[in-house]
Image: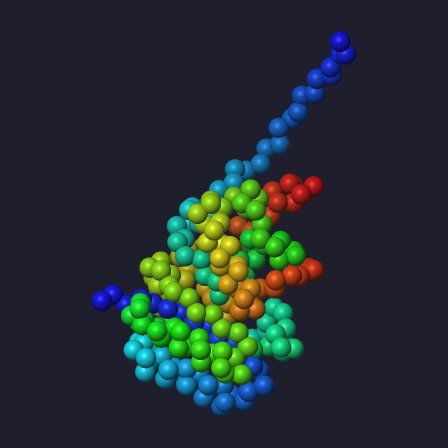
Amino acid sequence: MAKTNYESVVVLTPVLSEKMMQEAVLSFEKLITENGGELIHKENWGLTKMAYPIQKKTTGFYQIFEFAAEPNAEIVDKLELAYRRDEQVLRYLCIKLDKHAAKYNERRRNGEFNKPKVKETAAPEAAKPTPTPAPVAEAKSEPTSNEEE
Amino acid sequence: MAKRKRYTRTPIIRPKKYCRFKKSGIKYIDYKNPDFLMAFINEQGKLLPRRITGTSLKFQRKVAVAVKRCRHIALLPYVADQMK
């Protein structure tokens, strides 16, 4: 009866007030727990700028859920159906996490991201990691430009 | 019977490329971290080939999936003019 870990990212419209956004998030949470899911972690990035406009909106509320459920349960289908029905949802993504991903997320949650040099940290706290990955990126981009010439 | 000129090419010495995932023992590539994924795409937002980044095939596939997921949730653009 091994449970599988899933991760779900939802982008909600920026039109919502803080309260409405939280209500929407709560309703999804409820849906997860009521369908036999076990909420492991949730994360709210708040109003975040998107890389391209969706429905003419340039920002969105990012919400991330991580939950464990039985692999054959229809929880993901139900969740996706709820996302599709909800007009406040601009984008959603539900994925199954493999063991490496689950481990990575656990470490990320505990905030121990100094060890892997490159992959360090989530986007919100991007301030610190920049010194470390930068040299790697530079070293790599040099041969890139050479080959393009 | 034309005479052929012989050119001796001086080899360009570049540091050897390596797969950074193998080297630093990264097993999972986070799609929620666009700053990191920027290293694997060009200015137009296209995926860079393995021959340039040096990534091993196994991880190149994972990079590709991560970039695509990242684009879907609008953290990376599908198309861009100047990203970097």
Residue shown at 59% from the left, 33% from the top: B13
Q: Position of residue B24 (x, y in %)?
A: 42, 49
- Asked if residue A6 shows in the view, the reply is yes
Q: How is the image coloured?
A: rainbow
In the displayed orientation, state which residue is furthest to the left. A1
- Asked if residue A45 shows in the view, the reply is no
Residue shown at 52% from the left, 43% from the top: B54
Quadrant position of the N terminus of chain A in the picture: bottom left
Nearer to me, A84 or B59? A84
Task: Name above or below for residue B51 compared with residue A94.
Answer: above
Residue shown at 56% from the left, 64% from the top: B71
Residue shown at 63% from the left, 69% from the top: A52
In the displayed orientation, state which residue is furthest to the top. B1
Q: Position of residue A128 (x, y in %)?
A: 50, 64
Q: Position of residue A16 (x, y in %)?
A: 55, 87
Nearer to me, B35 or A31? A31
